[in-house]
Amino acid sequence: MKLNNLDSNIRYAVQLFTGFVVSGAILLFVFSDIEFSILINKYSDPFLDHFFNAITQLGLGALLAVLAVVLLFIRYYYAILCAGILLVSGIVTFVFKKILFADAMRPLFFLYDKQLRFPIGMEEHFKHSFPSGHTMTIFAIAFILFWIYKNSRVATINFTLAVLVGISRIYLFQHFLIDIYFGAILGIAESIFVVWLFENKFRLHQIKILRKSILSNKRIPQWNFNKGKMAPQ
């Protein structure tokens, strides 16, 4: 399907992520992993330490589980979709970190003895660098929320938060640029795979009971981002 034939909101999201992929590829070409980590470190200060320590928590895998529970109050299918992404993400993370790239070392392994400013509250991890699990998680969350609402504003907010989480992993010396770059791509790819599997093979979205929610009898409202008001489910 051509990009011009897609819904405008989906087309916008595709363009947004394509811009990220192209920009990331350029940065990977211009800088080595260590050079980019040192460059980011030059702008570190106590305020950014606290900011990135807080925002990096959005990439915790447990957040996908929490989101799945929350989505039970909106639609069962959305919760199942989120749970599927959580399962696939866990498998992908294990295969990459523990098997394929078990020897990939984190920035601290190479930079610990350098004259750098290390952020307040930084955790000391040295192994299992590739890919960034936090980045995979937050980009998967960004995708599933966009898929539910299919709105450009949702895409912009989610994408911005996802990029900030990725930057936080570099800032806090937990990952290299290449780790978050491929973490983002994997997070989106595994989410698209789950949506395709559930909607084209299992057709779960067509099952009537899965269109309901825990509070479906109470007609729980959902936010309509296009109209800026609450709308019934």
Image (cartoon, rainbow, N blue to C red):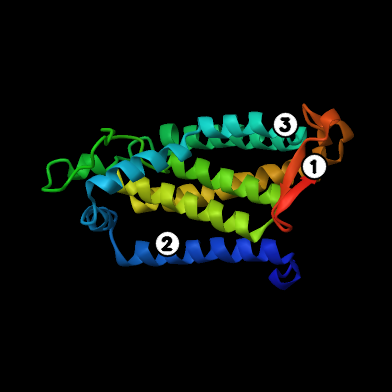
Residue 83 percent coordinates (x, y): 65, 32
Q: Of the residues under marks 3 and 1, which one precedes in the sequence?
A: 3
Q: Which residue is mark 3?
A: 73
User: What label does residue 67 carry, if any?
Assistant: none
Instruction: Kindly report which numbered mark, 3 or 1, lies closer to the viewer in this rendering.
Output: 3
Amino acid of disc 2: Gly
- Disc 1 secondary structure class: helix
Name the residue: 47% across, 39% down: 58
Would you say residue 174 is visible in this rendering? no
Q: CA distance from mark 3 to mark 1?
A: 25 Å
Please tell me how crowded label 2 is: few (under 14), some (14-19), or many (20+) other residues with Cα within 10 Å.
Answer: some
Q: CA distance from mark 3 to mark 2?
A: 37 Å
Q: Of the residues under marks 1 and 2, which one precedes in the sequence?
A: 2
Name the residue: 48% across, 32% down: 94
Please tell me how crowded label 1 is: few (under 14), some (14-19), or many (20+) other residues with Cα within 10 Å.
Answer: few
Would you say residue 199 is visible in this rendering? yes
Instruction: Kindly report which numbered mark, 1 or 2, lies closer to the viewer in this rendering.
Output: 2
Residue lying farthest to the bottom in this orientation? 4
Q: Which residue is mark 2?
A: 24
Quick check: 118 above or below 15?
above
Give 103 or 210, whichever is nearer the viewer.
Answer: 210
User: What label does residue 201 carry, if any?
Assistant: 1
In the rendered image, which quarter contains the C terminus? top right
